[in-house]
């Protein structure tokens, strides 16, 4: 795993959590709707009728998704701590600030250059140089 891939894990995980939240919201929305009768299929009387309320499957899916999100948030907190500690090991203060703004605060290079009062090309160069200095921890190298 490269240093950029390692540092980008927070953004990737955050985006995954965002999409999962959208999915959980959709399941919740579906749990409020009532299914209509499907007249296209022939009526078959079953000896074991489904007695579960139709909205229950959507609620169960929503709760399962929310549990997954909770687990990912714990993982993201641990990952953020690891990445922050890795960035703190960089000696150059400018590089450290740039990396934290980029990968912890998820700011764009343009916003970083404005915040640090440097030009965009300088911010890009510092970013490239900072990525060369970052050492990926052993436990993330083989992923």
Image (cartoon, rainbow, N blue to C red):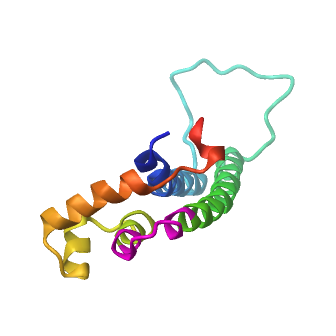
Closest to the observer: 61 or 33? 61
Q: Position of residue 129 (x, y in %)?
A: 31, 56
Tell me the quarter of the picture where residue 72 sits: bottom right
Q: Position of residue 12 (x, y in %)?
A: 46, 51
User: Magenta span has 95?
Assistant: yes
Is 69 left, or right, of 103 in this rendering? Answer: right
Is 68 left, or right, of 19 in this rendering? Answer: right
Report the predominant secondary structure element of the magenta stretch: helix
Q: Position of residue 131 (x, y in %)?
A: 37, 54
Name the residue rendered at 26%, 72% in the picture: 112
Closest to the observer: 126 or 36? 126
Q: How many marks?
A: 0
Seen in the picture, residue 142 relative to 35 is either above or below; the reply is above
Name the residue rendered at 57%, 43% in the picture: 35
Tell me the quarter of the picture where residue 49 sits: top right
Which residue is farthest front?
A: 91
Q: Position of residue 114 (x, y in %)?
A: 19, 78
Range of the magenta residues? Answer: 86-97
């Amino acid at each position: 795993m490269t240093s950029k891939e390692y540092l980008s894990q927070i953004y990737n995980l955050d985006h995954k959590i965002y999409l999962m939240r959208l999915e959980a919201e959709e399941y919740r929305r579906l749990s409020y709707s009532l299914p209509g009768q499907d007249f296209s299929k022939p009526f078959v009387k079953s000896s074991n009728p489904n007695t579960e309320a139709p909205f229950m499957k959507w609620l169960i899916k929503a709760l399962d998704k929310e549990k997954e999100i909770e687990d990912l948030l714990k993982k993201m907190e641990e990952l953020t701590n690891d990445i922050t500690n890795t960035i703190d090991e960089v000696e150059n203060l400018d590089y450290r600030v740039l990396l934290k703004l980029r990968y912890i605060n998820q700011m764009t290079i343009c916003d970083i250059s404005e915040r640090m009062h440097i030009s965009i090309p300088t911010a890009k160069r510092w970013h490239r140089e900072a990525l060369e200095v970052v050492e990926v921890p052993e436990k993330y190298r083989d992923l």
